[in-house]
Image (spheres, rainbow, N blue to C red):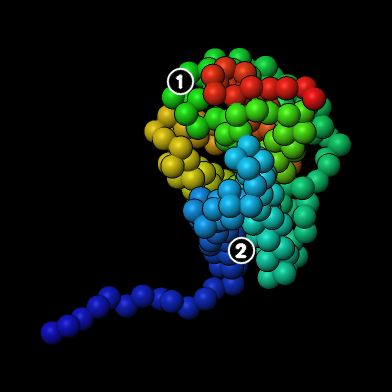
């Protein structure tokens, strides 16, 4: 006889606080990723512009889209549907008591990771993918807009993972289960970038989660991530034999 186990599917008070951020992180990252990787979107830019200009405009668009899709939209949905939560509850806040703590850890981690990233960014396997803008000739405008693109993208990225996907989960799940969920999804988003980045995201994700909770803000994770991305990009730009920089 066909039977199944009884499952309590009733919606309990507080379920939305943990359910919504996890689902939003998954859905909006999927939206970002498949838009950024879309051949149709890429074709639009390469049909309209010359190669170097198309590459620059396409990558900047993906960065700006990431800022909106992973930063603006998920937190907007949370603010609408999760009563009692404000931007400060997601780590977008200035806390005077932890300011010095945040500055010291941001500088300390940056001093540690920048040389490591600089060394690895010079390796041939990294130069295959970076800099993401594959323009043969880089102008000063491209350099500035590339830096701005990473800044905006990483704000949205960190706001999603260290904000939306962390702070609301602490009360319903507990600190360590919330961190485990965060690290699992954070590491999974690096799978398309290869095994090294996927594995590396696990300890980095743990450290950033702990520092985020200790400081009460997303700023340590955000600024350290920006330092890593800028170092990687501009090191790759310097050592990639297929790219050249002109000041004019």
Gap in angstroms between the C-alphas marked 2 and 1: 44 Å
Asked whether disc 2 touches disc 1, contact meaning CB atoms under 8 Å apart, the reply is no
Residue appearing at x 65%, y 60% in the figure: 74
Q: Give the quadrant of the C terminus.
A: top right
Q: Residue 163: which numbered mark, if any?
A: none
Residue at image mark 1: 124
Task: Residue lying at the far bottom in this picture: please name it.
Answer: 1
Front position in the image: 227 or 235: 235
**Mark 2 or 1 closer to N-term?**
2
| Element assignment for label 1 | helix
Q: Position of residue 143 (x, y in %)?
A: 72, 30
Question: Is any part of residue 216 visible from this angle?
Answer: no
Above or below — where is 225 with respect to 237?
A: below
Front position in the image: 213 or 39: 39
Q: Give the quadrant of the N terminus.
A: bottom left
Residue at image mark 2: 17
Give the crowd class for mark 2: few <14, some 14-19, many >=20 residues within 10 Å: many
């Amino acid at each position: 006889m066909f039977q199944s186990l009884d499952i309590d599917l009733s919606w309990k008070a507080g379920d939305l606080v943990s359910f919504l951020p996890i689902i939003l992180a998954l859905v909006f990252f999927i939206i970002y990723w498949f838009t950024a990787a879309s051949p149709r979107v890429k074709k639009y830019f390469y049909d309209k512009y010359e190669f170097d200009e198309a590459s620059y405009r396409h990558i900047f668009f993906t960065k700006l889209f990431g800022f909106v899709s992973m930063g603006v939209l998920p937190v907007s949905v949370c603010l609408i549907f999760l009563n009692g939560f404000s931007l400060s509850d997601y780590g977008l806040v200035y806390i005077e008591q932890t300011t010095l703590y945040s500055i010291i850890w941001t500088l300390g981690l940056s001093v540690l990771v920048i040389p490591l990233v600089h060394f690895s960014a010079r390796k041939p396997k990294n130069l295959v993918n970076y800099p993401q803008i594959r323009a043969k000739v880089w102008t000063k405008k491209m350099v500035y807009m590339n830096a701005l693109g990473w800044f905006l993208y990483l704000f949205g990225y960190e706001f999603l993972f260290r904000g939306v996907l962390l702070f609301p989960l602490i009360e319903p799940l507990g600190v360590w289960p919330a961190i485990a969920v965060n690290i699992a999804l954070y590491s999974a988003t690096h799978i398309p970038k290869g095994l090294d980045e996927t594995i590396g995201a696990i300890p980095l994700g743990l450290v950033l989660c702990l520092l985020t909770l200790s400081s009460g803000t997303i700023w340590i994770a955000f600024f350290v991530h920006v330092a890593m991305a800028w170092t990687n990009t501009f090191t790759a730009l310097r050592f990639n034999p297929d790219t050249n920089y002109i000041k004019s």
